[in-house]
């Protein structure tokens, strides 16, 4: 495997979510990826300084979500981006509430042909499964540290115009619904305040 084809697989997961981790381990062979768990940032770790630095202009309060949990997810992904850039290693990021629905040849990834390869559904805004090259991780991290963040991580990723996004021909991963309660939106994603110019 050439140097630019080398990659690390991180499964983003709260250390306390043992049921989710057991689920992911149970499908590890089916996925065909030798992942390790990345201990996600917890809502309790979101300090006032972090809120002021990154989330001062977000619209999370307009939604029936736990704002600190959305922020923690965002910071968790940023930490993985930093790890990728610092270690000059491409990464595949998966979250702990997914299942693989179509087999995928992981050796077929051509890291030079994309910035981010979404590995979930064929369309849509999501961050529960994606591949990102280390150079793109460094670029995206710099972008996030420069802009005024207004939305959740998956939307900021989707709206970053300079990133070349690639989607699979067929769905690879899908989230499993009705199995685990959402850490971000236990009551489901719904708006509690109306502002047609903003979205989560």
Image: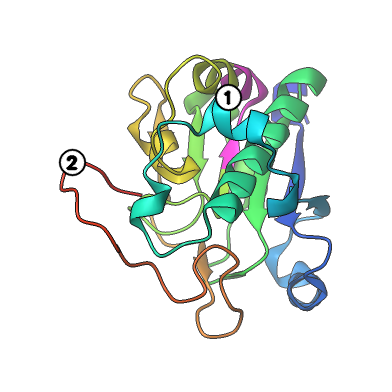
Mark 1 and mark 2: Cα distance apart in space:
23 Å
Q: Crowding at label 2, few (<14), some or many (≥20) Cα neighbours within 10 Å?
A: few
What residue is shown with label 1? Answer: 53
- 65 vs 88, nearest the viewer: 65
Question: On screen, 58 above or below 69?
Answer: above
Give the quadrant of residue 54: top right
Find out whether residue 133 is within the magenta segment: yes
- 77 vs 45, nearest the viewer: 45
Percent coordinates x, y for residue 45 in the rendering = 75, 45
The N terminus: image quadrant: top right
Kindly identify the residue that appears in the image at 56 percent across and 18 percent down. Answer: 145
- Closer to the chain start, of discs 1 and 2, is 1
**Left or right of 98: which side holds 194?**
left
Name the magenta segment's main secondary structure.
helix
- Colour mode? rainbow
Tell me if I can see residue 42 in this picture: no
What residue is shown with label 2? Answer: 197
Kindly identify the residue that appears in the image at 40 percent across and 51 percent down. Answer: 61
Kindly identify the residue that appears in the image at 37 percent across and 38 percent down. Answer: 158
Magenta-drawn segment: 131-138
Q: Crowding at label 1, few (<14), some or many (≥20) Cα neighbours within 10 Å?
A: few
């Amino acid at each position: 495997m050439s140097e630019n084809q080398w990659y690390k697989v991180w499964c983003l997961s709260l250390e306390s979510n043992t049921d989710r981790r057991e689920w992911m381990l149970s499908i590890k062979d089916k996925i065909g990826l030798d992942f390790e768990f990345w201990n996600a940032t917890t809502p309790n770790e979101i300090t006032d300084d972090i809120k002021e630095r990154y989330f001062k202009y977000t619209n999370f309060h307009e939604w029936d979500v736990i704002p600190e949990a959305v922020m923690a997810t965002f910071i968790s992904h940023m930490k993985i981006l930093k790890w990728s850039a610092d270690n000059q290693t491409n990464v595949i990021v998966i979250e702990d509430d997914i299942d693989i629905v179509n087999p995928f040849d992981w050796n077929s990834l051509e890291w030079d042909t994309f910035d981010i390869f979404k590995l979930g559904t064929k369309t849509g805004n999501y961050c529960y499964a994606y591949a990102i090259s280390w150079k793109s991780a460094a670029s995206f991290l710099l972008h996030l540290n420069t802009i005024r963040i207004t939305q959740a991580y998956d939307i900021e990723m989707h709206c970053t115009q300079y990133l070349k996004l690639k989607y699979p021909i067929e769905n690879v991963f899908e989230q499993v619904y009705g199995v685990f309660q959402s850490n971000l939106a236990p009551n489901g994603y719904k708006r509690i305040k109306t502002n047609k110019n903003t979205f989560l």
